[in-house]
Image: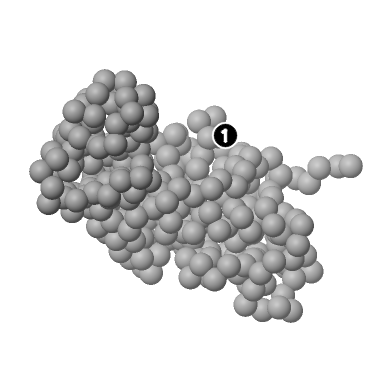
Amino acid sequence: MTPRPAVSIAARRRRSPTPPPGSRAPAPQPETSFLITREHRRFAEFADAVRANRYIGACYGPPGIGKTLSARTYAAAADWEAWQARRSVTDSALPDSLLRSRSVVWTPHVTTTPRELDVEVPGICDLFSDAVQARLNPDYHPALTLEVDPGCPYTELLIVDEADRLRTTGLEQLRDYFDRFHLGLILIGMPGLERRLARYPQLYSRIGFAHHYRPLAAPDLAAVLAAYWQLLGHTLNPDSPADADAIAAVARITGGNFRLIERLLGQVRRVLDINDLDTITADVIDTARGALVIGT
């Protein structure tokens, strides 16, 4: 059987909603519990503005603070992956969360080539747009639509996570795709991404918003720790001196970093079990910290 040729960004035709050739879509992953924090609300406002104004937005921040989780939550990425897994078995309707988000998340691999980007990005945007149009119009069938594709009208926002992995050619391809099909584009990366983008005038001139994603503030940290305390079978009382000291210890060690909090509390569970303890104290937190490798 002759494989279908790759479809470039410059000239594309309608395809049936199947994964693009050569793509490496990740398997559906269960979404971890996500608390709506102040930083996530700021990210959602930023994404709404990029999507509504059809700008390019840059979101940057240190690793582990929740950028990817915010992006996936905003785009309902877990629902999208679950729907893709189901549709080969049953003709299930697209979830309402995806009708609201009109957004897709794409993460390049470390070794993603220009050809792979040229196939995967239009492929996921086409597939999402076709799925939304089929949900809104039951008579629509993309396999029967053969005319040249004018774009992805129902994909309003493309979020590219780990944008630091892309070389100059990849960034230029995304700018070209943004220009041709008039959708919002968010590039997520490490601190310094905004300075790197400034070296490409054609790309930087199209950036309408830059968002600095910050670690958890004190009120949000207390709410997140209350959820973790509950998972460990305890109740957090910030007014209690012991719990207040424990919160302060977590803040000092993690700096409000989501990923470090998760790793630290995993070790706290281990310390509690090994020593048969029933109280989470600052000493327990410091003991758990000794089992972790934490950079500056």
The residue labelled by disc 1 is 113
Question: Quick one: which residue is furthest to the right in this view?
Answer: 1
Q: Is residue 147 above or below residue 257?
A: below
Horizontal and vertical percent position of residue 183: 47, 62
How many marks can you see?
1
Q: Is residue 229 left or right of residue 6?
A: left
- Looking at the rendered structure, the kind of residue marked 1 is Thr
Horizontal and vertical percent position of residue 268: 31, 32
Horizontal and vertical percent position of residue 131: 64, 66
Front-most of residues 61 and 165? 61
- Figure quadrant of the N terminus: top right
Front-most of residues 182 and 187? 187
At 64% from the left and 73% from the top, the residue drawn is: 135
Q: Is residue 108 above or below residue 223?
A: above
Q: Is residue 95 left or right of residue 291?
A: right
Quadrant location of residue 248?
A: top left
